[in-house]
């Protein structure tokens, strides 16, 4: 541009100089200078008009006009800029086309939702899986198109760490898993995945476990019945030993079958349908009636600290099963003469049921996997205790169905604390606290060790 300005000045001076010399020769120097300058100005206006014409064509495919001198240099410069802009544009277009091609090839539906909850962009799979229409649905509110109240609730709640699975609005036989991620200012990226096949396989697995467990029940009852009859007879000692061991194993198998049946029932739905008010103290009392005999045999001491003013609403059989698994585990895994504290209290976070023992404790590496089916810290210890390996898996499922959570704190050699946390929504206040023997046994001075390892399971 600097060069251009110089050549413009040079041409102006050349024209003025030439006009002056011609003027001197013919005797009218001022007239010839004026004429020369007017001619020069007209030439500049013509070139300027050419440039404006080119601008107004507004077509980046047409090259700037051909000319010489400083205007030629300017047009060459513009042509160079135009070419580099064109190649940058082509590059960006290719990137966008490749991005669109790759998102179209995706099996999952991808939808971009703007800050006002309107649909901004989506790929082809969104049309197929969710029935979106490219023209008609552009800019429409997402909740007008995905109207399932469960989706609307999930969307509005704004907690997207877990996905939600619902039938597709376009094909009711398709099961779609929705996962939302926030990005930018307040935009959202919705990924919808067809999980029908996985759900069918999961259902088949659940049905198989439920049917197999059910089928095993009858032969086991018959075997146990015969074993009991035989053991009532006068038999030689070695035979009695053998039959007693068979009876013990048959009982274990029965426990295993009923735990498997319970787990498959719990897995069948993530929500409890028949909520009832549950009196926590009476559930605990009922469990204690069974556990006390075993605790007595092992010389354990129980301490109870139960809030008499609060209960919760849920499924009594399920909660009974979860609490009894925790209490029986504490009794079984704590060596003779242990102390087991059972507490129920309510605070701002909700209701909490805890079982604390001073048993062997569990190493921190085991804690994340403790609620997996058949996961055992010490195989020999667990088999000797008669456990099925499904107790904590049942606790986890029961809590999930009550929107609760299990936390495990443990320190090797000191003991373990298993706590069930329930949300405030299901806590109920008892108007007339009942008298019960357990409330009188409140524990004083049972301190919690802050150095315990801990784990939360959902
Ligand atoms: P199991 O039927 O084997 O007890 P669970 O699912 O109830 O199965 O427990 C899983 C494992 O967690 C147990 O095998 C045991 O090793 C460990 N465990 C559970 N409760 C306790 C406890 N109170 N103290 C020590 N270890 C425990």
Image (tube, grey):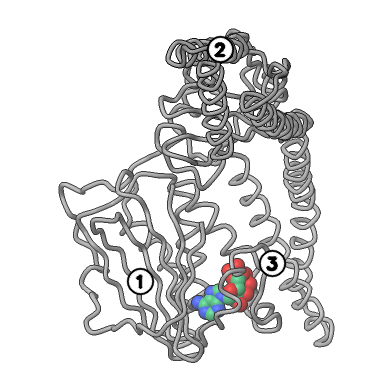
Task: Report the residue marked by disc 3.
Answer: 374
Q: Within the image, what quadrant is residue 44 found in? A: top right
Q: Is mark 3 within 8 Å of ligand 1?
A: yes
Q: Within the image, what quadrant is residue 381 found in? A: bottom right
For residue 342, the mark is 1
Mark 3 to mark 2 CA distance (whole Å): 82 Å
Task: Report the residue marked by disc 2.
Answer: 52
Q: Position of residue 220 (x, y in %)?
A: 77, 58
Residue appearing at x 49%, y 28% in the figure? 150
- The answer to whether 288 is drawn above or below residue 321 in the figure is below
**Badge 1 or badge 3: first in the primary sequence:** 1
Residue 38 versus residue 180: which sits nearer the camera? 38
Residue appearing at x 57%, y 22% in the figure? 18
Q: Position of residue 245 (x, y in %)?
A: 76, 78
Q: Is residue 299 left or right of residue 162?
A: left
The secondary structure type at the circle numbered 3 is loop
Q: Nearer the viewer, mark 1 or mark 2?
A: 2
Q: Nearer the viewer, mark 3 or mark 2?
A: 2
Mark 1 to mark 3 CA distance (whole Å): 25 Å
Q: Position of residue 154 (x, y in %)?
A: 46, 34
**Badge 3 or badge 2: first in the primary sequence:** 2
Residue appearing at x 48%, y 39% in the figure? 272
Category of crowding for the residue at label 1, using alpha-carbon neighbours closer than 10 angstroms: few (below 14), some (14–19), many (at least 20): many
Q: Is residue 367 left or right of residue 308?
A: right
Residue 302 versus residue 30: which sits nearer the camera? 30
Mark 1 to mark 2 CA distance (whole Å): 89 Å
């Amino acid at each position: 541009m600097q060069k251009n300005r110089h050549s413009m000045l040079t041409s102006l001076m050349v024209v003025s100089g030439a006009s002056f010399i011609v003027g001197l020769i013919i005797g009218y120097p001022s007239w010839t200078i004026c004429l020369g300058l007017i001619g020069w100005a007209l030439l500049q206006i013509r070139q300027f008009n050419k440039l404006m014409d080119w601008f107004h064509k507004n077509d980046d495919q047409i090259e700037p006009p051909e000319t010489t001198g400083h205007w030629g240099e300017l047009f060459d410069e513009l042509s160079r800029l135009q070419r580099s802009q064109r190649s940058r544009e082509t590059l960006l277009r290719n990137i966008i086309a490749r991005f669109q091609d790759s998102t179209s090839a995706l099996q999952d539906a991808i939808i971009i939702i703007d800050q006002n909850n309107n649909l901004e962009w989506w790929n082809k799979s969104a049309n197929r899986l969710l029935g979106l229409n490219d023209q008609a649905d552009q800019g429409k509110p997402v909740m007008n198109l995905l109207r399932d109240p469960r989706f609307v609730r999930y969307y509005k709640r704004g907690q997207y760490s877990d996905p939600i699975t619902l039938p597709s609005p376009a094909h009711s036989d398709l099961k779609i898993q929705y996962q939302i991620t926030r990005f930018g200012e307040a935009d959202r990226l919705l990924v919808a995945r067809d999980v029908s096949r996985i759900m069918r396989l999961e259902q088949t697995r659940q049905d198989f476990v439920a049917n197999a467990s059910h089928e095993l029940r009858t032969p086991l009852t018959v075997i146990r019945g015969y074993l009991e009859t035989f053991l009532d007879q006068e038999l030689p000692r070695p035979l009695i030993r053998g039959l007693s061991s068979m009876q013990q194993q048959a009982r274990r198998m029965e426990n295993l079958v009923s735990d498997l049946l319970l787990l498959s029932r719990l897995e069948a739905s993530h929500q409890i349908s028949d909520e009832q008010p549950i009196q926590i103290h009476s559930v605990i009392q009922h469990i204690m009636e069974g556990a006390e005999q075993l605790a007595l045999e092992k010389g354990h001491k129980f301490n109870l600290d139960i809030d008499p003013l609060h209960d919760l609403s849920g499924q009594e059989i399920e909660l009974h099963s979860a609490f009894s698994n925790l209490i029986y585990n504490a009794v079984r895994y704590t060596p003779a003469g242990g102390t087991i504290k059972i507490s129920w209290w309510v605070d701002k976070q909700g209701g909490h049921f805890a079982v604390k023992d001073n048993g062997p404790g569990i190493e921190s590496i085991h804690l994340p996997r403790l609620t997996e089916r058949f996961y055992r810290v010490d195989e020999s210890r667990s088999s000797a205790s008669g456990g099925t390996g499904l107790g904590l898996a049942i606790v986890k499922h029961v809590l999930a169905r009550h929107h609760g959570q299990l936390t495990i704190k443990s320190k090797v050699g000191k003991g373990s604390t298993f706590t069930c946390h329930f949300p405030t929504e299901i806590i109920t206040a008892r108007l007339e606290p009942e008298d019960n023997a357990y409330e009188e046994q409140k524990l004083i001075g049972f301190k919690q060790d802050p150095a315990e390892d801990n784990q939360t399971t959902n």
